[in-house]
Image: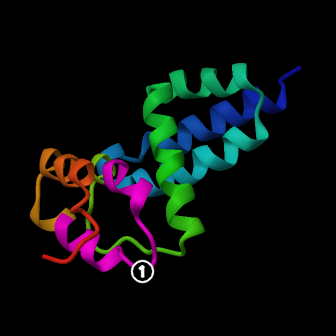
Amino acid sequence: MTSWADLTIVHATQKVKGFRLETDWLEIGRALKNLSNRMKPEPYKKLLRAIDLSDRTAFYLIAIVTRLDAQEIKVPGNIGWRKLAEVAPILTYENQMIIFNKVFSHTREELIKMRQDGTLAKEG
């Protein structure tokens, strides 16, 4: 007899196969958030292996989606998940335009430095 977890893994694997992490990270993150809340740890890890995604990457995608949803923030344009992972911890509805402008005009490494020195969410 096939378990719910096994069916979920098969279904999710088939669905995610058509996605590309760099461009479809938001959809993948939302799906992972939903599945991680509904699945036990071992089947969830099996799912991640089936879609060739590391635990760490899944953690970051879920954290980004959680932050965006909690702050009711819509991502403008095509921003990669790696950049958003760097700015998500301080991203708020109020500072989103400042931060998104910097995300579009700076490298990930520059964003990390700005976050560390406290200038990421400041004008200028």
State the extent of the magenta-drawn residues as a range: 84-102
What residue is shown with label 1?
Answer: 94
Q: Quadrant of residue 17?
A: top left
Residue 63 placement (x, y as % from top left) = 52, 48
Q: Is residue 81 left or right of residue 48?
A: left
Depth check: give the residue in front, 50 or 39.
Answer: 39
Query: Around disc 1, counting alpha carbons within 10 Å, would you say few (fewer than 14), some (14 to 19), or many (20 or more)?
Result: few
Q: Quadrant of the C terminus?
A: bottom left
Residue 81 placement (x, y as % from top left) = 33, 50
Depth check: give the residue in front, 15 or 49.
Answer: 49
Colour mode of the rendering = rainbow
Q: Quadrant of the N terminus?
A: top right
User: Does 11 sit above or below residue 3?
Assistant: below
Q: Residue at x 59, y 44 (%)?
A: 32
Residue 28 placement (x, y as % from top left) = 49, 49
- Identity of the residue furthest to the front in this view: 117
- Residue type marked 1: Glu
Depth check: give the residue in front, 24 or 109.
Answer: 109
In reply to whether residue 88 is colored magenta, the answer given is yes
